[in-house]
Image (spheres, rainbow, N blue to C red):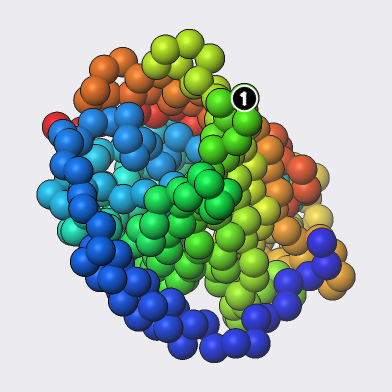
Amino acid sequence: MPSRTAITTPPIRVLLLLLLAAWQTAFALEDTKEEIKKPLDIRSPGSDLANFPNSAFTLPQGGFYLESTPGSYATRSSTLASQYNWEYLLRYGLFDWMELRLYSQGFSVQGDPVPATGFSPLTFDTKIHFWDEFEEYRLPAAGLEVLLQTDLLGSSAFRSGTEPAFSMNFDQGLPWELQIEYNLGAARFENPQNTRQSVWDVTFSWAIQREIVEDVAVFLNGYYNAANLPRVGRVSEKWTPLCPKASGCRPEEIIKQTTALGGDDSQHAIGVGGIWTLNDKLSLFTNLAAGATAPTPSFTGFLGFAWTP
């Protein structure tokens, strides 16, 4: 992929228009459909941290999910240091069609060339469910997600500024009992040719899942430019030694460098994973992915759980 170019439409205006349309649509749907209430469980709508995309579905009003990955690791790439994270995602159903979410990569340890230990900042997120799937028209379930990555409560080594993103989320059934989930949106990234600037670029993530035995499902998933949540760095961390010593340099002797003009600075990954639902309250998941470009970590692995009271 060529170097990123800015999206010309004012992003804030787009976000406001999408939110207004979503609000009006959701209220219209609420007035015309009858909701069938059932106890919340971990099977539906299911975990969003298990794979790279997020579902189009939201928790019912008053519903709560805790999702976390005590084991999350990404190897070093051409622009990113290796990093361990203990992610968490808190989800709360404000209405049956609107969910409030709080995400962070949590406790983080960054590897060479600039080792650091601390906490990643908070990301504020909201998801709105538009409609369920219309199978007779082959129309997928749809929703809108808008998030804002901040520097709040983040250690200095893991702050990357205020970075907004949004996506349209879709879920759809396929033949052979397959389910597909995909997100199409945009996020703001650091400009790899000028690290003092940020540009907007398209993001796409997907997952195809199938239950192989009762309560055990496997999936293929991947992303283009970024996963839906900021789980992989959007900021260049390519460091180049200035000193000529073969044995290495002190931290104050290395500087941040931008990527070469015209280079491929995009991140693409593809992986496999599985979800094991232990009961109505708890599920375990894993996701192992390989990078397809030099700026993408060659290996990214997640091991986590989702729980509801």
Q: Residue furthest top?
A: 213
| Image: 86 above or below 260 | above
Residue drawn at point x = 23 percent, y = 31 percent: 41
The image position of residue 264, as x and y in percent, is 81, 61
The image position of residue 229, as x and y in percent, is 47, 53
In-image side of 120 versus 7 (left or right): left
Q: Secondary structure at mark 1?
A: loop
The image position of residue 239, as x and y in percent, is 68, 58
Residue drawn at point x = 50 percent, y = 62 percent: 168
Between residue 193 and residue 288, name the one nearer to us: 288
- Tell me which amino acid carries mark 1: Trp
Q: Is residue 260 visible?
A: no
In-image side of 58 versus 189 (left or right): left
Residue drawn at point x = 57 percent, y = 68 percent: 186
Q: Quadrant of the C terminus?
A: top left
Residue drawn at point x = 64 percent, y = 70 percent: 201
Q: Which residue is mark 1?
A: 176
The image position of residue 108, as x and y in percent, is 41, 44
